[in-house]
Amino acid sequence: MSSSNAVDYKSLGLRVGLEIHVQLNTRRKLFCPCPTRLASSHSAELHRQLRPARSEVGEVDPATLLEWSKRKPYRYLVPREESCLVEADEEPPHQLDRESLLVALAIAKALRMRIVDEIHVMRKIVIDGSNVSGFQRTALIALNGYIEVEGRKIGVQTLCLEEDAARKVEETDAEVVYMLDRLGIPLVEIATSPDIDSPELALKVALKIGQLVRLTGKAKWGLGSIRQDINVSIAGGAKTETKGIQHLYMIPLVIEYEIKRQLELLKIRDELKARGLSPESIKPAIIDVTEVFKNTSSKIIRRALEKGGVVSALVLPGFKGLLARSIQPNRRFGTELSDYAKAWSGVGGIFHTDELPGYGISEVEVAKLYNATGADPSRDAIVIVADDKDRVEKALLAVAERAAYATIGVPEETRAANPDCTTKYMRPRPGAARMYPETDIPPVLVTRDLLEEASKYISEHPDVKYRRLVEKHKLSKELASALLNDLMLDFYEYLAEKYCEKIPCSVIASILVNTIPMLRREGVPVDNLSEDVIEEVVRLLAEGVVAKEAIPDILAYLAKNPGVSVVDAVNALGIRRLSVEELDALIASIIEKTRSKLLERPEKAFSIVMGEVMKTARGSVDGKLVAERVKYKLKELLNIN
Ligand SMILES: [Zn+2]
């Protein structure tokens, strides 16, 4: 942002740290010999139910408690080839995969990190069922390095090698279903220091780290192969962690929206303080108001009552008007309260008086509600929930706790990214000390031999690469620098090697660093384009089936219609490349139609015919070839030069 009213992130005390996870494309998984690919079917199922365990110090982790309070059973789909007894937790893990370790060491070296002398595999408690054993195995490989981005040194705190979690395929009210294929795929997890002080810099750092991992030649490509968590805090706010950001390009907006959220929450706190409120002002008193709604026309409440549920209310004294305050696009402070209710009790949501009357709830009912609770309609807000009694109670207690914290400030929490880059409450930040040694796997000594072997995964220096791109691949300086800053640099090198004899490297480079970003700016969902699809387009281009001019249209069509084959897209768009014979026939017919006009103004003949041909054939023919054939045909048919 360069405009004069841009947010001054420095004065806000913005601190951002990234945690980047990249899947490795190794021959086997981290702790067993299964292949690192996803399965399309399964041959068996497993069932498990998680129970909270007390830690050594006798406390139940709050995040664990939240998951347990949902008490959903887990069902695991077991693919025949992509999992074995290790994923099912029926056999101890095997030795740490050597190839994954070498790649991790190479990345650590490239990030100028201090590599540990001895690698210990640890167990990290996971609470959402995404690992059958109830913990994820992780190993610290290196610490304290840095990466240079735009002349700035951004600290890299840790690099870990860990196993990916099982893939969630379904979540219903009754159960959570996971597929075991992804469980155990090696991941490198790289955590930066909170040195990043603007949303744009965060994106650049993420791109650079992602590229560095991909240049080992051992990173997986495609959607979900790079995932990031973002820590954000501002002065006076709190550190929050947003999980599950699948697209790098979401990073700047997620950060901007989180800053906005924290600023708005601080304003709400100041307002609450000005109204004389403290955490003690919010009493967790739950009042049954079922009677008020016995003849309601609210469908949601009627449905809950028909099932034998109740309607209960919680008074938020002095909160009137604040629940309607916007804190992120399409999200209000009331939405935050609602998220807590949903996360802690499983209810569908809450109603609050700042949005009532509405949703079938009448003005009369709102008046009765104030009456029944003894709240002050000019000053207080009331939250109501309709569901079974137990859930309603849990939901309103969670709302009371969150509302009380609003008088203090921004709570530290783990949040989940929504597709529009806003975020929602997921769970409290997990307590520390969730790691235990994995006694089934002996420690690995990092020897000189191991480090030397790792060197083969280290990519050449960027300056050397740049010279090669300009001198050998004949790329312009602009294209070469753009590629060096692009996540798809490794993919470019793969394509260039395979297709450079048939098409210029600059055409391939331009598709990756010009066409795709241009389509992204136009709002085309280019993340739907897998590397396989892009390669197929390049292949058809190399074989002369499509013209280079048609590439943007083909890619846009494929992005908007995921699953459609490239050949089908080309047919649907009617942009198969014309053969020279077809082109000649088209030119001849145009000359025939415009013959008298051409003979009248022979000096304009070329541009008239050229214009007409391009009007019909743009995208399916190369402009240079058209010019050549038009000149030839004009001479042949009209004797015009
Ligand atoms: Zn396995």
Image (tube, grey):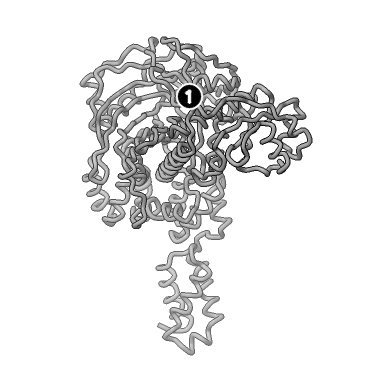
Left/right of residue 162 with respect to residue 335 in the rendered view: left
Q: Quadrant of residue 199?
A: top left
What amino acid is labelled 1 in the image? Leu
Q: Is residue 130 above or below residue 598?
A: above
Q: Is mark 1 within 8 Å of ligand 1?
A: no
Q: Residue furthest bottom?
A: 600
Image coordinates of residue 75 in percent, x first then y, are: 59, 21
For this rendering, which residue is in front, 121 or 467?
A: 121
Left/right of residue 59 with respect to residue 300 in the rendered view: left
For this rendering, which residue is in front, 196 or 81?
A: 196
Image coordinates of residue 43 in percent, x first then y, are: 60, 22
* Numbered marks: total: 1
Please name the residue shown 45% across and 52% down the image: 520
Which quadrant, please, contains the C terminus? bottom left
Q: Residue furthest right?
A: 295
Q: Residues within 10 Å of mark 1 (few under 14, many from 20)?
A: many
Image coordinates of residue 374 in percent, x first then y, are: 65, 32
Image coordinates of residue 329 in percent, x first then y, are: 51, 46
| Label 1: which secondary element | loop
For this rendering, which residue is in front, 572 or 600?
A: 572
Q: Is residue 89 above or below residue 268?
A: above
Q: Is residue 247 visible?
A: no
Please name the residue shown 47% across and 11% down the image: 54
Q: Quadrant of residue 157?
A: top left
Q: Which residue position holds label 1?
A: 183
Left/right of residue 377 with respect to residue 156 in the rendered view: right
Q: Is residue 432 visible?
A: yes
